[in-house]
Amino acid sequence: VQAGSPILHGYFRSSCSWRVRIAFALKGVEYDQLPVNLIKDGGQQLAVIQYIDETRPGPRLLPADPKTRAQVRMISDLIASGIQPLQNLYVIQKIGAEKMQWSQHFIDRGFQALEPILKQTAGKYCVGDEISMADICLVPQVYNAERFKVDVGKYPTIKRLNEALLEIEAFQVSHPSRQPDTPDDLRA
């Protein structure tokens, strides 16, 4: 651990940790990681992303324009509060044998709400042509959708945005398959 560097306590496959890793990578922040083997997910980390945005130089993760910023927050909240918590490890463990169907149902339901919104707001990325907190939320959720065998092809805007974002280094270096605590069989 480097003195003065932020420390991220996270789990390689946690969507919340991944969102923070993307924000750090976009801002060029060097940080140390302390892996935590989760029994249940650590909660939402949008406040952490907003803190990083407000305290670190680099690209804005929340746009200056109030209308655009509201669109970013709406999309981020839909994903981080409306879709992702229903696939948290704790919830999935409680569901048991029905976890695949449960996850598919709620991801599909969320993507059905998200797709038309993104058709209206998207440019190159979720809201226009600048990467934002909405993009940081989208990529981990699409990863979960693929993990739970959701047909992402039914959502062409979501699919296109995810593919574009995965070409960006910050999204690649923060990927769950490239983390210190990633099991060997899941490494890229």
Image (tube, rainbow, N blue to C red):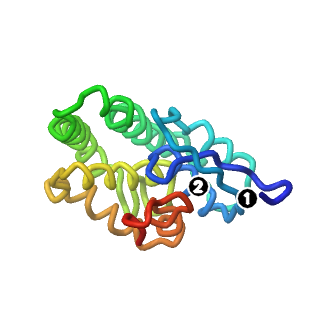
Residue, disc 1 = 57
Image location of residue 51, percent across then percent down = 68, 42
From the viewer's side, name the closer residue of 62 and 103.
103
Q: Looking at the picture, does residue 9 appear above or below residue 44?
A: below
Disc 1, SS: loop
Q: Residue 71 appears in which quarter of the rendering?
A: top left
Residue, disc 2 = 23
Sort mark 2 into few (<14), some (14-19) or many (20+) by Cα contacts within 10 Å. Answer: many
Disc 2, SS: helix
Relative side of 72 to 87, left or right:
right
Q: Residue 167 appears in which quarter of the rendering?
A: bottom left
Q: Quadrant of the C terminus?
A: bottom left
Q: Looking at the picture, does residue 23 appear above or below residue 79?
A: below
From the viewer's side, name the closer residue of 26 and 18.
18
Q: Looking at the picture, does residue 120 appear above or below residue 169?
A: above
Sort mark 1 into few (<14), some (14-19) or many (20+) by Cα contacts within 10 Å. Answer: few
Image location of residue 73, percent across then percent down = 48, 39
Q: Residue 92 appears in which quarter of the rendering?
A: top left
Q: Residue at x 73, y 54 (%)?
A: 56
Relative side of 68 to 99, left or right:
right
Image location of residue 74, percent across then percent down = 42, 37
Mark in front: 2 vs 1: 2
Q: What amino acid does circle 2 point to?
A: Ala
